[in-house]
Image (spheres, rainbow, N blue to C red):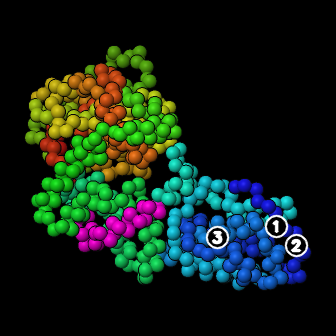
Amino acid sequence: MPDLPSPPTAAAPSIDDHYDDLLASIRARFGKRTKDKPSLFTTRTPALYQVFLDAVPAELRQTNTCAACRHFVNRYGGIVVVDSDGRARSALWDPETAPEPYTSAIRALAKAVAEAPIDGVFLSDETVWGTPQTGAWEHIAVTPSKDLLHKPTLIKTNAQIMAEKRQDHETLLRGLEAFSIDVVKQAHKLVSTESLYRSETVLGVAKWLLELHETRAAAKNARARENLTWLAVARAPAGFCHVRSSMIGTLLEDLAAGMPFAEVKSRFAAKMHPLQYQRPQAAPTTGNLARAEKIVEALKSAGAMERRFARLGDIETLWVPKEPRPKGQKPGVFDHLKPAAKLAVDMDVPPVTMTWEKFARTVLPEAENIEFFVPETNQSYIGMVTAKHADAPPLLQWDFEDRRNRVSSYVYANGSPPARWNLKPNVYHPVTAIALQPWMWNPKKILTHHGTGVIFILKDARDRDYKQGAGFFPSYLRSEYHEIRATMEAYAQSAVVEGKDTAEACGISLVKGSTWNLSFRVASKGGMRVVYKLDRWD
């Protein structure tokens, strides 16, 4: 913030103005209203500092004619927080705690702010709001907690992000007007019951949109309804406000048009096909290529796009085979005298059919070794890749600075034959590890809109016929790359992932929402082997 001129020197007021108490009450109000890290909003207020001056006693107006305080009140004075019932409250002005002779002025400010409509989301990375002191003069200022600070991205300023939020608000309102709550309820029911192909991709936004419709319907008046909409905009995940131009929008349009369910289902499946969903169908334009160069340079992410096939050490596993000797433990002098390990004995029982969730809960804890029976048919064999450079910045949505995860996965549409993955059909292959899909590794931030699935990593499995592509998909990328997804798609299709012959993290993928009927032979403690047929997720 530029230096501000000090206010003109004025004679001390003829009354005790308790100015220090006023400053303390403003800071206390701000701390109280923002202690729970709420979203902050701007309001369409008049020139607030003039409202303040008009309401202070006449003998205090010259003393309070201050450029620093005027700047603070006019810039920050209209900030509000929105309660769960839609009521907007000033973040700064509390007439109940303001000292005399400022009570009337603070009440006037609080009233002006309460009556003003919200017109934007407020974001700032400034560590001090206002100018606390110039020379001997103290001014109105507050210090926001670290949780209130919003760091701009490397490609967008906070002012640009605030402008996007205003646009998101307008876009969301059009979506809410276009699709009634009844239509949204119908869509939510379809995707939450897994009646549609890959419905988990839009379940999050469907749930969010339905909850917003219900919240708005319960609002006590139009102002509260509008405030709650702004609250939703401030908290919405990237893309959620763009209802009409998203996949949930196409589903809502079909339902609103009264299409038969079979047609709705077919159209949704076609749009959600892995080769269509969020996959640009045209080559990137010259302008998009130029923009991509600028974004990648700003994010310093060129190295993140160089990928290699993952190894076991890159994977967060749920299960690994029991080691004959703990890692790092040296062979004992008398190891050769120990009894030979007993071979596992097959149980004379038919295969046990169960869900993945039951298998994970009841079988995995006791499993010492697992093998997968490779069918002759095409299956969802999967490869996992990661960043070639460990110090590369985050590229993927599930890769965070405080919890790095550079791994992504790929499968081939309609499955692939076992020979492609160096697997012999009709025999059991050892499982070297079990892992969830990479976007599920962080228990605090599981991105279920990418699907729910588990991967059985198979010994010596690798994509023998791999030539190029599959380093990542546009739908995997962080929001900073959304506007250049055509360029990123073209890059990913042509780039070559290194290390296919040393890959250690390829296997068979089991995805929630599908029927599998795949067989696994498990050797458990006690030396007994049982075949389990996994048929579905839960």
Q: Which mark is residue 495?
A: none
Of the two numbered discs 3 and 1 on the same chain, state the one appearing first in sequence.
1
Of the two numbered discs 3 and 2 on the same chain, state the one appearing first in sequence.
2
Q: Which residue is mark 1?
A: 7
Front residue of this view, candidates 10 and 389: 10
Q: Residue at x 76, y 66 (%)?
A: 67
Per the image, is 182 magenta? yes
Q: Position of residue 340 (x, y in %)?
A: 27, 21
Q: Is there a contact, CB below 8 Å, between mark 2 and mark 1?
A: yes
Horizontally, residue 514 falls left or right of residue 5, namely left
How many numbered circles does the render carry? 3
Position of 84 relative to 361 (above/below): below
Horizontally, residue 317 falls left or right of residue 392, namely left
Q: Is there a contact, CB below 8 Å, between mark 3 and mark 2?
A: no
Residue 48 visible here: yes
- SS for tag 2? loop
Q: Which residue is mark 3?
A: 77
Dot 1 surroundings within 10 Å: few (below 14), some, or many (20 or more)?
some
Q: Position of residue 274 (x, y in %)?
A: 23, 43
